[in-house]
Amino acid sequence: MSLENNNASNFIRTIITEDLQSGKHKEIITRFPPEPNGYLHVGHAKSILLNFGLAEDFGGKTNLRFDDTNPVKEDTEYVESIKEDVEWLGVKWDKLLFASDYFEEMYNRAVLLIKKGKAYVCDLTPEEAKEYRGTLTEPGKESPFRNRSVEENLELFERMRKGEFKDGEKVLRAKIDMSSPNMNMRDPIIYRIAHATHHNTGDKWCIYPMYDFAHPLEDAIEGITHSICTLEFEAHRPLYDWVVEECEMDAKPRQIEFARLNITNTVMSKRKLKQLVDERVVDGWDDPRMPTISGMRRRGFTPEAIRNFCREIGVAKSDSVVDSQMLDFFLREDLQPKAPLAMAVLKPLKLVITNYPEGQSEILEIENNAKDETKGTRMVPFSRELYIEQDDFMEVPAHKYFRLFPGNEVRLKGAYFVKCTDVIKDENGNVTEVHCTYDPETKSGSGFTGRKVKATIHWVDAKTALPAQFRLFEPLILDDAPENEGKHFLEQINPHSMEILEGFIEDVAFKDAKALDKFQLVRNGFFCVDPKYTTPEKFCFNRIVALKSSFKPAK
């Protein structure tokens, strides 16, 4: 489970090892703390596997904790989806917790800060507060409410809790340093008013702690030893430590930052992903084009491929962008030995074997996995009329085109040699049928050596084939660096990110297939049975990944 890359040092592992050896900690406790305001994406998978993997490697524990401090954006739907995603990745949490379980404790710690003169109720409007905050080059100005008495602050904070003020009318701010070069330390807001129903606590509260106040308290309450987060929280670390210290928490967690996962042609922002869903650019959070874990699962990704991918990219201190082809590579590596081989025609063209007896059919024995004989064989029907891929026929062949064209002979996979003798066209001149003759002496496995052909094409039996829909995907985002704020990401949407084709599949391989079953379709790639659009009348398949790529991970 560990994400340690054997080719590079893992600085987090080094820190943990030193802390254990020095006796600072006897047991390692980490946590994965998502906010339930959206579905998890592949970037979260890296964090999940890192937190759970490190704890497992050191014999420790990991909590799954929901940072549910913003009732306006959070929902039970997201809680349930996150639990499902974490379990699907193959990890097990020690405790399932909610930040909202600690609201009373957080309130009491805020009262402690007020009593110590370290927090005050502020009446500045958001616009005024922004003006008072200063800039990166200029210090901020102190709020005119900064020097309220302890007694007045306690009274106002209690009235905030009782619901006597409107949203935004007052906030509780930490009293730190308005001239600090770190903007996060310039009297940050630690409580705000929000008259909203909370998914876990209902209407019990109308004031809610801010993330920067709640998160360190949650970690300390749970005894988290190493609070592992992404680099954007590095500047928040002084505030994290301040909250733990000034709130007089017994446990002293250590925040450690690592580089977030960025992948080419992939948006890694829950806010942006939610926008895609809300504006119906995609078919829900589990759209197979989405980088959400639920979307990847529906498309046909395996947890093993994601784990191997995350292990390969390792853990770093600086941000970088990973080529999406690397993830495709690990998908193929994982699917190749697992996915049974089958035949499907995505763009069908009828092929008629004119010298094959009408009404006759036979059963051919064909391998289930091209690279693993232990996967056995299946018995596939074969008769006079078949479907082949449109791309496997050209009336006027291009240079070095060796597949079917008038006068040329090819092998039908697992069957016979056939030679094109004629074509049938519609009134618009489009080829609707290809007529061939076959040589019964050339049956696969017969030992025939009389002549050779330069191409083998796949097929399905027209009499027994099942209709099926195929969904082929390209990157949803055209830009290699979609997180570039200089361009609105909706302008980068690929209008051709999904192609829907109507074709046929062989009956034998698929008659018992169920949702999310995976197959290697000869020459077309790895496909998964879509759980949303498959019906008793017709299968729907998502292409997980194409068969070939020149990409190879660095050694």
Image (cartoon, rainbow, N blue to C red):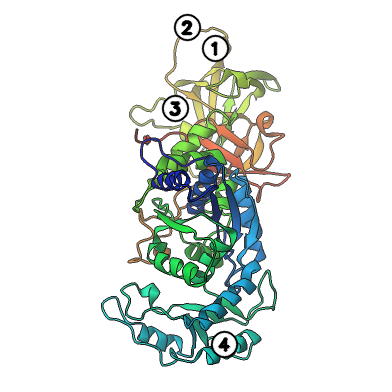
What residue sits 48% from the left and 21% below the top? 410
Whole-angstrom CA distance, mark 3 to mark 1, is 19 Å
Distance from Cα at disc 4 to Cα at disc 2: 97 Å
Mark sitting earlier along the chain (3/4) = 4
Q: What element carries label 1?
A: helix
Q: Name the residue under label 1.
A: 442
Q: Residue at x 55, y 54 (%)?
A: 31
Residue assigned mark 3: 405
> CB of mark 2 within 8 Å of CB of mark 1?
yes
For mark 2, what is the residue? 450
Task: Give percent across and percent down for residue 179.
Answer: 32, 80
**x and y percent of residue 29 in the render?**
55, 51
Residue 146: x %, y % from top left? 43, 88
Q: Are marks 3 and 4 in contact (CB under 8 Å)?
A: no
Q: What residue type is labelled 3?
A: Phe
Mark sitting earlier along the chain (1/4):
4
- Do we see residue 426 in this rendering? no
Q: Which of marks 3 and 2 is in front?
A: 2
In this view, 254 is above or below 22: below
Q: Which quadrant of the view contains residue 398?
A: top left
Dot 2 crowding, Cα within 10 Å, few <14, some 14–19, many 20+: few
Element carrying mark 3:
loop
Choose between 174 and 359: the one closer to the eye. Answer: 174
3D distance between C-alphas at marks 3 and 4: 87 Å
What amino acid type should be assigned to the residue bearing mark 2? Answer: Gly
